[in-house]
Image (cartoon, coloured by chain):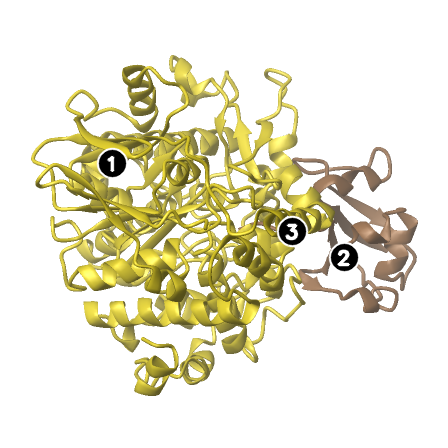
Chain colours: A brown, B yellow
Amino acid sequence: MKNRVKLYANLGKYLPDGTAEGPTGNEADLEFDDGVTVGGVLEQLAVPREHCHLVLVNGIFVPPGERDGWALKEDDHLAVWPPVAGG
Amino acid sequence: MSWTKKILRVNLTNGTCESEPLNMEWANQYLGQRGLATKYLVEETDPKVDPLSPDNKLIMATGPLTGTIAPTGGRYSVVTKGALTGAIACSNSGGFFGAEVKNAGWDMIIFEGKSDKPVYLNIRNENAELIDAGDLWGKSVWETEDMIREAQGDNDVRIASIGKTGENQLLLACIVNDKDRAAGRSGVGAVMGSKNLKAVCVRGTLGVQVRDGMEFMQATNAAKKILAENAVTGEGLPTYGTQVLMNVINETGALPTHNAGDVQFEGASKIGGEAMHEIRESDGKANLVSNHACFSCPISCARVSQIDPTHFTVQGKPKYLEPSGGLEYESAWSLGAATGVDDLEALTYCNFICNEQGFDPISFGSTVAAAMELYEKGTITNDDTGGIELKFGSTEALVQIIEATANGEGFGLEVGMGSKRLCEKYGDPDLSMTVKGQEFPAYDPRGIQGMGLAYATSNRGACHLRGYTVASEILGIPEKTDPLVTDGKAGLVKAFQDATAAVDSSGTCVFTTFALTLDDIAPEIAAACEGDWTADSLVEVGERIWNMERQYNLDAGFTGKDDLLPKRLLKDAAKTGPAKGLTNGLDKMLPEYYELRGWDANGVPSDETKSRLSL
């Protein structure tokens, strides 16, 4: 199945070579096995867990303890940030 | 002690500058900066005073940690009755000016009266005098700083000044120090302009004493270690600044777009923090040149940007080609998402203009967004705008209108008075995205419910920095809460408001609280000052300050009915994103908030509450 994966801030480098799109190259449409979990995607992309501070699926926060059990559906958008803040 | 125990009182009517002792009883109750200056304003002025009359006072106040080596110890606040709101105003700024005031031996400067001609205040340690500013009137903030430095023959002076918008008493006017740091909100620059006070120049070399040097070193080193090791303050903010939030808030469906008609902006990723790092094809450079730190700040979140030299906004204008203060999240949102403009270079140009002529980009962008909606509805026409086609998404229109506001021309003057007055004038007040007359910032309360209560109850009008529950609701600091529910938000908002009031009175930056708790900050204050300063006492001080500000507003004529959000946020559900179908549940949160505050059903602090807080 296809999912939009958005790796923001300095995480864009973990997108597979040649897939990065968007104005800043922080996102890509990627193919995954049906039922892949959020944790599974992050593992496949080799994004270090400690850098996955804010993880959203379709804008909804996925707590760290639920990432390995949260199955993605076709066309779900996954967005990830390292620890960031603003004001 | 890190209070100098001295106030500089400047009577602009008489042209006098006099030293007087700081009221230490009040310092122990209100700490400094925001709290202490508000106490002086409350005691010395009538809350019903016309903000732009000589009877209003303008106070520039440091905190006990300002000018010390405490991390971020460079803050000062401008406290007055807000020209934009008619409510208590307290605008906080960084840079180096506040620390210089403290090092000159002053805890605060109180300006009263009105000069009969333009003047600036020149402070050299204990010596202060008013100097004719006839040659500076009509000059920008940038020109004013350069001219004063040359006149004083000293590049080390620090300057806070107003630009043309402050002189014109436009209600969006700021006071800008160090060329791009601003006491930005509530129209404090208009108050300064009304007093014919163009600038304050200060050089301080006296140093700041602390109660116990060794204890202070230990406390401040401990705080610096926490800030350095924290992933947000040690890495996230220095690298991406506040602008990293653009995509975060857009993804969470809480980015007010097109005058809050929408909650997500298609062009968000073109104007966010990541975009500022992108290398441009035109000149091989990125918009972002570097980060920048205020006095004694180890976080260094400020942005320095350089505009694409081929961009239409800077053709024939070499002064805008130099690196200068870049976009923060709030300014990128207001100038960009709110208006539908996704041109990063144009937004950077507009941000430069706000710094140069001293006006608040949050209120300006929000007002332009309201004007664009009125234009698209046909309520405002080309006859009103002088031919500017004010359509959502029009970069050209945004640039034309900001230049008009900066120069005090045509429709720009109407925009410079804020969206409340603009929308009322054109018969559509519900299109003004304001609370107590102040434009709300970059978080849509349909997608972040707690921020609705924070805006509605903010004492200075809608504001994110009075109770930044975004930290919890979105960023998980100190712990994650669900942004889409109202349960628990009354207590969350109150806790953030009280803690923030204390930090705003300390002389340090509220951004430290992404890593530090009051348990970390209290030892710094305790080592610097006399008095019993603990996390608990700071919370009590914060609550006292909040209630004092509230009472000032009530005495000024506000009531609980003003704790209200724009109808759009309460009636029109979010169209997309996680909050799709939701409005803000203010009616569910407000009664609980009043109860937690110890206020009656009309939002008035009870006698018991006032007694408990020694008010």
Q: Are marks 3 and 2 on the same chain?
A: no
**Callout 3: 10 Å neighbours few (<14), some, many (20+)?**
many
Secondary element under disc 2, as helix, strand or loop, is: loop
Q: Is residue B577 visible?
A: no
Task: Please tell me which residue lies in front, B529 or B454.
Answer: B529
Give the residue type that dot 3 points to.
Ala
Disc 3 to disc 2: CB gap under 8 Å: no
Left or right position of B90 against A1: left
Which residue is labeled 3 in the image?
Answer: B223
Q: Position of residue B348 (x, y in %)?
A: 47, 31
Give the residue type that dot 2 points to.
Asp
Task: Choose mark 3 or mark 1, whichever is in front.
Answer: 3
Q: Are marks 2 and 1 on the same chain?
A: no
Left or right position of B611 against A80: left
Q: CA distance from mark 3 to mark 2?
A: 44 Å
Q: Is residue B2 visible?
A: yes
Task: Please tell me which residue lies in front, B178 or B508.
Answer: B508
Identity of the residue drawn at 41% across and 37% down: B103
Which residue is labeled 1 in the image?
Answer: B165
Identity of the residue drawn at 59% across and 68% down: B483
Which residue is labeled 2 in the image?
Answer: A75
Give the residue type that dot 1 points to.
Thr
Secondary element under disc 1, as helix, strand or loop, is: helix
Q: Position of residue B124 (x, y in %)?
A: 31, 29
Task: Choose mark 3 or mark 2, whichever is in front.
Answer: 3
